[in-house]
Amino acid sequence: MTARSRRYFLVERYLPDADARSVATAVAGQTGPPDGPRHIGTVVISTEQTCLSVFEATDVATVTAATEAAGLPADRIVEAEWFPGTPQDQ
């Protein structure tokens, strides 16, 4: 994926019966080919029964395929801006 084609997508999932551990296990398997979508990270909000993930991909279709393959289909996927934080000094 070239820097020019890099786009970020926010994936929202409503998971009424899922716990954080099961979501972590499922998203850990969200790896694919080097030119496929890249899972940036996921936040689980247990009290809201919601899971939010960020992916880097060329288009929404590849993100949809990746989430379905992981067994965590999306309720909504939107293109978003991503601003990574600064790593702490070690």
Image: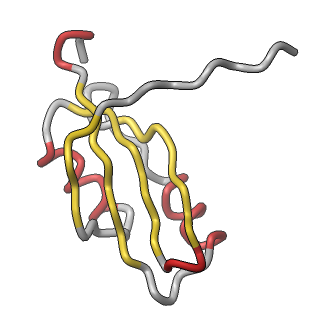
Which residue is more in the foreground, 84 or 27? 84
**Residue 6 position within the rendered picture, expressed as x and y whole percent measured from the top left:** 24, 21
Q: Residue at x 18, y 45 (%)?
A: 62
**Residue 24 position within the rendered picture, expressed as x and y whole percent measured from the top left:** 59, 61
- The N terminus: image quadrant: top left
- The C terminus: image quadrant: top right
**Residue 32 position within the rendered picture, expressed as x and y whole percent measured from the top left:** 35, 40
**Residue 73 position within the rendered picture, expressed as x and y whole percent measured from the top left:** 29, 69
Please count the marks in the image.
Answer: 0
Q: Residue at x 32, y 33 (%)?
A: 56
- Residue 58 occupies which quadrant of the picture? top left
- Residue 31 occupies which quadrant of the picture? top left
Which residue is more in the foreground, 36 or 87? 87
> Which residue, as the protein is rendered here, is positioned at the far bottom?
17
Q: Is residue 69 above or below residue 39?
A: below
Q: Is residue 79 above or below residue 12?
A: above
Taking the image as shown, residue 10 lies to the left or right of residue 39, namely left
Q: Residue at x 46, y 65 (%)?
A: 51
Taking the image as shown, residue 20 lies to the left or right of residue 52, namely right
- Residue 4 occupies which quadrant of the picture? top left
Q: Is residue 19 above or below residue 21?
A: below
> Which residue, as the protein is rendered here, is positioned at the far right?
90
Taking the image as shown, residue 70 lies to the left or right of residue 7, namely right
